Image (cartoon, rainbow, N blue to C red):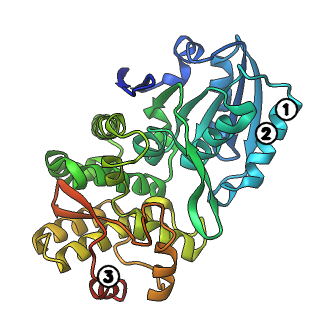
């Protein structure tokens, strides 16, 4: 096991990475604030890993909440259900919530922890690659609205993140590829050496080589911890982590939550952002082609679904990065160098959306 700290002004927390951590009762017991714990998971993950976690928490009184699977569960109705289950189980303010699952479970559980009795501790135990390298780290929690993804939520940091890399053995290939989109993102926005490493080792990652996955997860978490530590509430540099997300969230909302996986939409969104960067003269055509090739090798789509320009613009107008009525984009000057701008001529954006 390796451990890194995410340092924050109000106190940080550890990110533990290793194989078999769900079988480490001492590690997991140390994350429980008091004698009560509640595990939130879903119908796909529960048969695989719930018994391991409950066994590791045998010293505590454990409440289990099993949700249906899928992005469609990221609603206020699900939060209401979780809160109701916690109340019926008489979970007090010292109860620690455990998010056992992918990004959807983590986002929902974190938001429930933030609002239940005005805040209870929670622990992220991500079981998908996307959650391990991105959504479990940094304290973004929330649910979707019909008009936009993740529009209801808050920043609420976990007590710890426990990444058991062995859970990736049961991850479907499509979801592994979706997680690789977020891994590629870190190289594209600020780590050119990591991008080059991904170009050299993408085949190993898709073949689930343990050493390659461990390195990719660790490096991704290091990159995210560094950025979040410098800007917890996304007032500045943290917005760079949204590379591809302005386009990607519009895709997810337009086609209906769950039809495209988040990583698939982000993968295409990164390519749309790269094409916009090229069109504006900031990024070379060669770098855009390298990014496209890597996204394709990750097993991700490289062409967007059929969405009208008007629908894109409607959804982008409510993007969380928009300010003073202007949409802000994360664009590239080179692979490994990203920046944020709202100075995007309408004709350039329209051309990309119509391609």
- Viewer-side residue, 296 vs 345: 345
Mark toward the start of the polypeptide (1 vs 3): 1
Q: Mark 1 — residue?
A: 87
- Viewer-side residue, 154 vs 176: 154
Q: Which quarter of the figure is the N terminus placed in?
A: top left
Q: Mark 3 — residue?
A: 349
**Disc 1 + disc 2, Cβ < 8 Å:** yes
Q: Residue 96 at x, y = what percent?
A: 66, 24
- Is 87 on the left-hand or right-hand side of 295? right
**Disc 1 + disc 3, Cβ < 8 Å:** no
Spatial distance from mark 2 to mark 3, Cα to Cα? Answer: 42 Å
- Is 134 on the left-hand or right-hand side of 113? left
Please, what secondary structure does the residue beneath circle 2 have?
Answer: helix
Query: Quarter-wise, where is residue 141 in the image?
Result: top right
**Disc 2 + disc 3, Cβ < 8 Å:** no
Q: Which mark is residue 83?
A: 2
Mark toward the start of the polypeptide (2 vs 3): 2
Point 50% across, 37% down: residue: 167
Crowding around mark 3 (Cα neighbors within 10 Å: few <14, some 14 to 19, many 20+) is some
Crowding around mark 1 (Cα neighbors within 10 Å: few <14, some 14 to 19, many 20+) is few
- Is 147 on the left-hand or right-hand side of 294? right
Point 23% across, 55% down: residue: 188
Image position of 347 with respect to 187: above or below: below
Spatial distance from mark 1 to mark 2, Cα to Cα? Answer: 6 Å
């Amino acid at each position: 096991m390796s451990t890194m700290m995410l340092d924050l002004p109000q106190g940080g927390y550890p990110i533990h990475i290793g194989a078999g951590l769900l079988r480490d009762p001492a590690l997991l017991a140390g994350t429980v604030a008091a004698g009560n714990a509640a595990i939130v998971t879903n119908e796909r993950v529960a048969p695989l890993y719930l018994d391991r976690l409950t066994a590791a928490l045998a010293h505590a009184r454990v409440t289990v909440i099993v949700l249906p699977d899928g992005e469609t569960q990221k609603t206020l109705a699900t939060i209401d259900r979780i809160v109701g289950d916690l109340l019926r189980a008489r979970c007090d303010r010292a109860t620690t919530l455990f998010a056992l699952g992918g990004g959807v479970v983590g986002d929902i559980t974190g938001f429930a922890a933030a609002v239940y009795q005005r805040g209870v501790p929670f622990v992220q135990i991500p079981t998908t690659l996307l959650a391990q390298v991105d959504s479990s780290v940094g304290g973004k929690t929330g649910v979707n609205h019909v008009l936009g993804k993740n529009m209801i939520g808050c920043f609420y940091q976990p007590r710890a993140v426990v990444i058991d890399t062995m859970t990736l053995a049961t991850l479907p290939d499509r979801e592994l590829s979706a997680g690789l989109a977020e891994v590629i993102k870190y190289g594209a926005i600020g780590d050119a050496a990591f991008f080059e490493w991904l170009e050299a080792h993408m085949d190993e990652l898709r073949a689930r080589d343990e050493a390659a996955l461990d390195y990719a997860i660790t490096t991704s978490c290091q990159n995210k911890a560094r950025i979040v530590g410098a800007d917890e509430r996304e007032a500045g540099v943290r917005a760079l982590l949204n590379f591809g997300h302005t386009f990607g969230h519009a895709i997810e909302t337009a086609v209906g939550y769950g039809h495209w996986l988040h990583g698939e939409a982000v993968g295409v969104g990164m390519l749309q952002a790269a094409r916009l960067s090229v069109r504006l003269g900031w990024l070379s055509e060669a770098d855009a082609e390298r990014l496209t090739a890597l996204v394709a090798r990750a097993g991700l789509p490289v062409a967007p679904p059929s969405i009208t320009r008007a629908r894109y613009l409607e959804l982008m107008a409510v993007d969380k990065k928009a300010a003073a009525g202007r949409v802000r984009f994360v664009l590239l000057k080179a692979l490994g160098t990203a920046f944020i701008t709202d100075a995007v001529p309408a004709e350039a954006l329209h051309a990309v959306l119509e391609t």
